[in-house]
Image (tube, coloured by chain):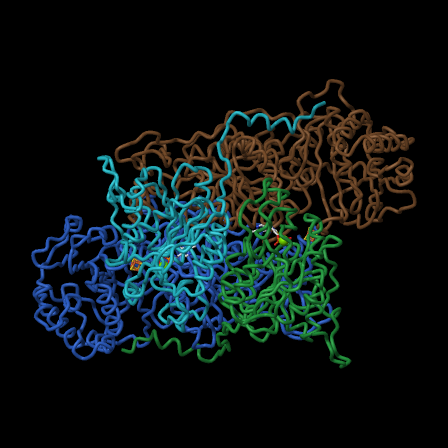
Chain colours: A green, B blue, C brown, D cyan
């Protein structure tokens, strides 16, 4: 997937980076995700002006401004509908949505599920750190139920975690993968695959919050490659998820579900004809 | 509005009621259409009991020789196919001693109606219907009404023919027979509510509802993307637009909720497509956070709120003007935006189209406050003019070194680069930002951007469309939206007593127009504020932004009943004005 | 507020800045605590760069011999551990020629600060720290400040001992050594900002933030259920309450979003448990639909909005009073509810507690408008009185034939049956309803229930708590919330020139209190409205509901910078008042 | 499950009915659901005053007022959080939430998923007619993608339907069943089981909208009993759902997931102690 073109005009990963300095804590996993994005874009040689990255609110959701593409930093939890509205009306663009686990699975949980169902051709990347980084350390839907350092859940959340890949599959996403910020090149490859696959692609990237979940530094020791290649059969994918330890890395599912692609080609001329329905033919 | 000398013969009000399946709505629609074909103006509104389907229903019509926008003080004719639960409509169908109540033979009309002192007439509707094979009472009723008001049967026959075509010739024939037979049964009452039909036919009349008119205005204004979630009484606007948009190469997406729909608009608009949604109070409440995003990120969107009774789920099927507050003030933070209100069925077209034009031009969010009364009223109107307002967004079309999406200066509107434009990449943001779009919490950036977002709206010249101003009196009635219609009728009533009042009805509610209002109020010494809300929201809004030397007086009546012209007249007279 | 003759020796303002890890926040907190133990009053606020963690930060303190609620016009001492990105804080830390800038030897202070004409002093902070094993500059700084302002070192030693206990004796010893050493290095500057410490110690002082105070008020008022979604700057309120609630047998639930949290409150309150949530602008916007449900279904709930810069995501970490509009007018339909605003850190306790009492008593929704400035300021205050306001909901405790949940009449408050009460089963409804709770779209029911919901609020006697009124002048300054503090200081400044102004600061913003306001304004001939918003929201609110013969003047300044007392004085003087 | 007590005080189904006349169209499936509710309550001999039924907005959501228990007719899509707040603070009550497929799976989709995760001891009954009845005939999340009579989706929704049982299982519901309004006795038995099972119980009841989906009258011919008994193993349940034709009737899953039961016993006395943390011990 690495960029092999020798053309002098070839864009490098750094050409996709903006000059804005990230606000992230030194060591935050999101830096690597940012570099995975730029590598993937370079691998695909996307025209920066034809790419739009949309996000909600959170540390991770700051990513659009750090890229040299078009971006929309929307409100908390609503990035997916913004992306859907854009992609439906501008099918010529590469639309990517990025954000955190709180943004995507808590306040934005419904849009996530419905976006999987709608299966518009776009890519959704969630930088999962199992915590609310931006608001300084509360539990998120992916947090383990017994994590007792969440500031609003002193005894742990004591509720079932949210399994993003399971919900994505059950709802109808057409591409499902997990990556790790510890391996930006691998993550870049997965993002590339996701963008290139038709329909709604979902990529969970494990991206440690070293400030509020310092123990996540150990993730690099835990993650391991998925043992098998991606399947196109939802039933097979579902069975694999039953034994998921939440740390396998790789592409789980590449489906053949038909993307939602309404015809959209605004024609100005015919607006006048609409009047005829109202005219009284005396 | 043309002034009409002889109210009796220039406007007739008719209510048709019946229980589930009686077909009064069909009859009402046909009557309206036939009247239109005969060159009359008119409106029809509907009312129904709580049953989802199949309960009692009322079709309320007013037919007139001049454009009408609201119901009259009383109904002239109340015709019931049956009286089951009919008294539920008592308050909505005021009668007088000159009114005529018609019902089935031997079926006593409810006392609630007869108490009015109206005359009554019994007709063997069922039997007449039965005389025709496949005959139905609602068709008989149509004939009766036509005969009473002197409407020729021919246009009605045409209507039956075109509307029943699908059902085959037999259906048409039996309906025509019922109509004719009904018309033949009115005896001495024939023509007793004769409308003076003009001989020259109005040649360019439309039969349209406010919701449809708003939808057409949206498309004319350039809207090509709608995302929405159904809600009464806005749904028909959306249902009309879904196929209509396709005809012009646009699309409507049914979203999972209002949070999704408004954000889909923001995405589509960011990509350059003028976008709109329609909802009602509860949906608007869910959208306010993201409307604020549209304001802060300067992404044009239009939200039509077809208001219904509130608060909370309230009274979904009835009209009220009680979302004024949330529309004006409902966004958190200082979020200047546009609020507009159509004042008639026809004006739903103009105002919605204008709203799109303004939102696009000024790169902000516009809220259009329609209401159930405007939206669901079906009216025969003169063909509205095709105004030139189309979306005209300021676009940065060419690459530009150091492009700043939120550049300050000038009139506050900064050209927007659309994705696809090389060299202008930026990130739109709802966080406060520097001119580049990069988040900033500096006091200076905040101040500059707050000024920018306010000034671009305040400095725009909205022209005379900002309000409708009529009359010359020293006493003003200030009103808005669907309350204008009864106020105009009240003015006509007062004029016939030789009294003129001045009517001021702002179509543009935000940004406020203090200079224009001052001019409109020149010479005025007292003003009554008429609105359909319990909390006198419009009255307080006027005090907040247009304080005057004189004190405003408030006539605020909540829904569900419409304001009647004579109430306005009485209110003015009670206060010792005239 | 006691009037203080000699401002210089009665209040000292100190800013400590440093880049990531320098520990200025810790030092600031310790200084505040030590000052409190020495019997001083004080406040501390924080500011930080955009970095999530580890960026530059500033601790801004004001210590005084009288209760202080806001920052002064200028800072007396600016002390930097390093100057990295320090100029970012320039606007927040105004200096004058009498100010002293202290920094590391040979590290030039930024021109942004020295331009003020302030004197400078270089100290070898790093070297002093290094002289002690494990020594840190921030501890040295503490000693320097104590010496400059003449604060005895003993209370500081105590603070170090109790706060560093977990870290062991070595840590305590090295910190004490650094402090002492720092104090010994001020040379001729020692005591140059001497605070006149009173000999009698204030014996009942608290160290508390506004967010904590609001949390405590909630629990005192009877709240036992909180459901919430984190958001800056309200999160600390919730974080304090989570364990505190458990101590009193209550619970806090972290919900999936604000839509869920507000509806969980409604469920809990329906079951009889006083319930509260805290949020900020974006969250409040999401809640308005369901706050309307609480109003319509007459289910008491309290929502604390800790306001931040708007619109949209705005400036999450900075204060602004720009959610007034959405709090007052943000519900769709006519939805009368309560809006209250605390005016100081201490008042966060009283006002929140009162809000719960009122919401419970009047069976409605209350919105409490705190702000970042109140919520995140940590202050040394006098122990607040333990007022008697506790939830006192009118409950239908016994079975009752024909129980009507929404019975009309009386003062409008109808007893609420809680689930478990036999014979009183009813369905609460957000649809308009008859007194029984059964949905109704009848005009009469709508009118009755609208009246009920309004009248129960309007007719309640809120007593003198409705506002703070101070002074006797003919010129009034009307203000609210955290803007009161600088206004009060401005009054003190004017008083020392022999000028008295009248201050009116409503704590109860809704329902409006026209008679009380009229009384408060008796004899007033002009009024300046001071608020921290761009759109002059409070000014327009006053015009809307309290119109006067004289015209209100507006001094509206958006965030993020606080309003300074001298700005208020200057504004009054510029307008030719005094 | 039928009520076997012979005590004279025994409550009959009709004792759980209120006097309020339903607004439903004659023939609407919801009438049978109402009767299933009253039968289930009678079967359990619940004290009417200790039962609360909470709903959102829709035809189906009108049900609380037709029952002689406590009720809350909340806003569209938010009935579940109302129920959660109530049950957590009033564990003594039997809390049931009822509503439609639009209310529960479209606007309320996130609360559904999160309620399954939280697993509070309550029962959620969705009267699924695959349409928005109240707003007169738009597609809902459970509508078939090719249903072309939805008034806002003239070409069909063309998106993946929402599979309520799948999402319930994936999210952590502790009891999952499907019933049919054509068999009110069977539905009553399922509701009874659901209420009696600890944790969050989800029951989908197929309940035809004869006005906007008249073809659903045929459902009575299509539904068929589940071939096997309920399992406590999520993996087994998941496998069964893979071959679900959406019309089997019966209880799929009875889990052993631990319900969310925070201690809640308000104690007034100790509020004063909280002050000590703020006192300056001079
Ligand atoms: C409506 C609303 N509610 C709450 C917030 C506060 N908020 C900002 S970011 C955030 C959570 C961020 O968590 P996540 O999405 O996981 O991102 P991370 O910071 O961990 O990358 C919250 C609750 C908000 N901005 N808007
Ligand atoms: C916030 C909001 N949006 C939209 C509506 C309009 N609305 C009322 S019921 C309904 C859908 C009902 O569908 P469903 O839940 O399936 O119930 P059914 O009528 O089919 O039983 C909608 C969209 C509303 N009341 N509130
Ligand atoms: S708080 Fe956590 S997620 Fe946020 S920037 Fe810091 S390390 Fe990253
Ligand atoms: S519209 Fe459909 S769901 Fe609603 S009451 Fe009628 S049949 Fe039932
Ligand atoms: Mg996170
Ligand atoms: Mg349904």
Above or below for D100 versus C224: below
Residue occupying image coordinates x 57% and y 54%:
B335
Q: Residue at x 79, y 32 (%)?
A: C168
Residue B80 horizontal side relative to residue C243, left or right: left
Answer left or right for C59 relative to B576.
right
Depth order, front residue of B264/B506: B264
Q: Position of residue B227 (x, y in %)?
A: 47, 65
Q: Hey, which residue is sitting farthest bottom in the picture?
A: A7
Task: Kindly tell me whether residue C374 is visible in this rendering.
Answer: yes
Q: Residue at x 72, y 67 (%)?
A: A185
In the image, is A14 to the left or to the right of D234? right
Residue B383 lies, with reference to residue B278, above or below; the image says below
User: Between residues C295 and A110, which one lies in front from this camera angle?
Assistant: A110
Q: Quadrant where the N terminus of chain C lies?
A: top right
In this orientation, does residue B529 appear?
no
Question: Farthest residue in the top direction?
Answer: C200
Q: Nearer the viewer, residue C133 or D22?
A: C133
Q: Position of residue C539 (x, y in %)?
A: 56, 44
User: In terms of image quarters, where does ligand 2 lie?
Assistant: bottom left
Nearer to the camera, C82 or C71 = C82
x and y percent of residue D228 in the render? 38, 58
Question: Image quadrant for the C terminus of chain C?
Answer: top right
Point out residue A35 in the picture as x, y percentages from the top left corner: 72, 64
Number of numbered tags placed on the structure image: 0
Residue at the limit of the structure toward the front, as seen here:
D228
Kindly indicate the quadrant of the structure image that contains residue C18. Answer: top right
């Amino acid at each position: 997937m690495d960029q092999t073109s020798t053309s002098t005009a070839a864009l490098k990963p750094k050409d996709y980076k903006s000059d804005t300095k990230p606000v992230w804590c030194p060591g935050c996993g999101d830096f690597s995700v940012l570099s995975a994005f730029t590598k993937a874009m370079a691998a695909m040689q996307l025209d920066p002006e034809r790419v739009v990255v949309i996000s909600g609110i959170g540390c991770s959701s700051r990513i659009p401004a750090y890229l040299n593409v078009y971006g929309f930093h929307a409100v908390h939890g609503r990035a997916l509908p913004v992306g859907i509205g854009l992609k439906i009306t501008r099918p010529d663009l590469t639309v990517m949505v990025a954000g955190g686990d709180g943004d995507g699975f808590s306040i934005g949980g419904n849009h996530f599920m419905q976006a999987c169902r709608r299966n518009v051709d776009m890519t959704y990347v969630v930088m999962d750190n199992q915590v609310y980084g931006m608001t300084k350390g509360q539990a998120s839907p992916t947090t383990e139920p017994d994590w007792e350092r969440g500031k609003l859940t002193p005894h742990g959340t004591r509720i079932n975690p949210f399994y993003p890949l399971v919900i994505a599959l059950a709802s109808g996403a057409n591409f499902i993968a997990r990556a790790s910020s510890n391996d930006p090149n691998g993550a870049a490859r997965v993002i590339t695959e996701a963008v290139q696959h038709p329909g709604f692609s979902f990529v969970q990237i494990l991206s440690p919050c070293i400030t509020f979940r310092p123990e996540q530094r150990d993730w690099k020791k835990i993650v391991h490659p998925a043992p098998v290649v991606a399947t196109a059969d939802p039933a097979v994918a579902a069975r694999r998820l039953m034994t998921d330890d939440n740390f396998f890395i790789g592409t789980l599912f590449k489906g053949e579900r038909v993307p939602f692609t309404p015809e959209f080609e605004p024609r100005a001329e015919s607006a006048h004809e609409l009047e005829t329905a109202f005219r009284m033919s005396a | 509005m043309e002034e009409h000398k002889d109210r009796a013969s220039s406007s007739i009000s008719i209510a048709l009621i019946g229980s589930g399946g009686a077909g009064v709505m069909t009859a009402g629609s046909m009557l309206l259409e036939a009247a239109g074909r005969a060159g009359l103006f008119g409106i029809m509104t509907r009312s129904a009991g709580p049953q989802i389907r199949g309960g009692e229903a009322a079709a309320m019509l007013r037919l007139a020789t001049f454009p009408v926008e609201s119901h009259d003080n009383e109904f002239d004719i109340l015709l019931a196919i049956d009286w089951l639960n009919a008294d539920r409509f008592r308050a909505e169908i005021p009668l007088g001693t000159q009114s005529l109540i018609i019902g089935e033979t031997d079926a006593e009309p409810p006392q609630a109606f007869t108490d009015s002192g109206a005359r009554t007439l019994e007709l063997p509707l069922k039997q007449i219907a039965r005389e025709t094979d496949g005959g139905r009472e609602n068709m008989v009723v149509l004939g009766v009404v036509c005969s009473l008001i002197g409407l020729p049967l021919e246009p009605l026959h045409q209507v039956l023919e075109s509307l029943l075509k699908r059902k085959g010739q037999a259906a048409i024939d039996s309906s025509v027979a019922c109509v004719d037979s009904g018309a033949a049964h009115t005896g001495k009452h024939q023509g007793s509510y004769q409308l003076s039909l003009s001989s020259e036919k109005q040649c360019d009349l439309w039969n349209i509802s406010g919701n449809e008119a708003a939808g057409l205005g949206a498309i004319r204004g350039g809207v090509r993307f709608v995302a929405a979630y159904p809600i009464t009484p806005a749904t028909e606007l959306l249902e009309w637009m879904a196929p209509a948009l396709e005809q012009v190469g646009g699309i409507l997406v049914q979203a999972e909720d209002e949070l999704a729909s408004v954000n889909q608009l923001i995405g589509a608009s960011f990509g350059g497509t003028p976008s709109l949604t329609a909802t009602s109070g509860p949906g608007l409440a869910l959208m306010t956070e993201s409307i604020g995003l549209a304001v802060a990120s300067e992404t044009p969107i239009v939200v039509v709120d077809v208001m219904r009774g509130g608060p909370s789920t309230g009274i979904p099927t009835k009209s009220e003007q009680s979302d004024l507050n949330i529309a004006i003030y409902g966004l958190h933070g200082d979020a200047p935006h546009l609020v507009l209100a159509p004042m008639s069925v026809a004006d739903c077209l103009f105002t919605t189209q204008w709203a799109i034009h303004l939102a696009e031009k000024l790169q902000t969010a516009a809220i259009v406050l329609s209401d159930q009364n405007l939206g669901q009223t079906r009216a025969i109107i003169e063909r509205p003019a095709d105004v030139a307002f189309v979306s005209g967004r300021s676009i940065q079309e060419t690459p530009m070194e150091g492009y700043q999406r939120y550049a300050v200066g000038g009139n506050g509107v900064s050209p927007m680069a659309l994705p696809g434009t090389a060299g202008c990449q930026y990130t739109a943001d709802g966080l406060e930002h520097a001119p580049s779009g990069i988040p900033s919490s500096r006091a200076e950036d905040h101040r500059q951007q707050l000024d920018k977002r306010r000034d671009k709206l305040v400095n725009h010249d909205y022209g005379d469309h900002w309000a409708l101003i009529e009359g010359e009196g020293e006493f003003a009635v200030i009103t808005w939206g669907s309350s204008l219609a009864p106020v105009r009728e009240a003015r006509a009533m007062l004029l016939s007593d030789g009294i003129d009042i001045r009517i001021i009805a702002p179509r543009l509610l935000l940004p406020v127009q203090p200079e224009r209002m001052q001019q409109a109020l020149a010479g005025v010494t007292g003003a009554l504020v008429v609105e359909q809300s319990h909390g006198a929201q419009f009255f307080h809004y006027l005090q907040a932004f247009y304080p005057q030397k004189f004190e405003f007086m408030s006539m605020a009546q909540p829904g569900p009943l419409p304001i009647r012209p004579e109430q306005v007249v009485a209110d003015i007279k009670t206060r010792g004005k005239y």
